[in-house]
Image (cartoon, rainbow, N blue to C red):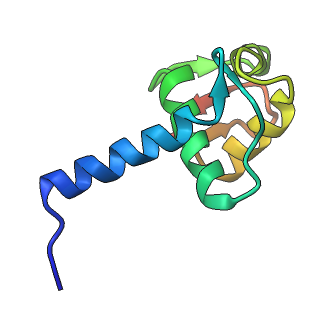
Amino acid sequence: MSENTASDTSENITSGSRAVTGLFSHGRLTAIPRKATRREQLLVHLKETLFEPGRQYTEREVNEALLTVHDDFPALRRYLITAGLLTRTRDGASYQRAA
């Protein structure tokens, strides 16, 4: 059994980034991946690039941010919530990036 080295970890991050980059064309998401692993990589990327830690967002702000990358922002928002990457208040009025 081998231990993960820094270069292995770096390589995994880079290949994950490359996989996410391949989902975009001209800054827009071409399709939401059907495979859970690829979709999870995309969602983590969206969380990290579109939403600031500790900041509260209205539903409209979340929608507008997601709309910059894909027209099906309701699906992306739902996936982010389901994956636990965004949290929302019980009434859905406020959203926040999960830690």
Tell me residue 18's x, y (percent). 46, 39
Quadrant of the image containing the C terminus: top left
| Residue 97 appears in the picture as rendered | no
Q: Residue furthest bottom?
A: 1
Tell me residue 74's x, y (percent). 85, 33
At x 59%, y 20%, the residue is 56
| Residue 35 appears in the picture as rendered | yes
At x 72%, y 18%, the residue is 58
Q: Is residue 61 left or right of residue 6?
A: right
The number of callouts visible is 0
Instruction: Tell me where residue 51 sits by quadrant.
Output: top right
Instruction: Tell me where residue 37 sits by quadrant.
Output: bottom right
Depth check, front residue: 93 or 53: 53
At x 70%, y 59%, the residue is 35
Rendered position, 10 above or below 67: below
Rendered position, 63 above or below 20: above
Tell me residue 98's x, y (percent). 51, 40
Q: Is residue 28 left or right of residue 12?
A: right
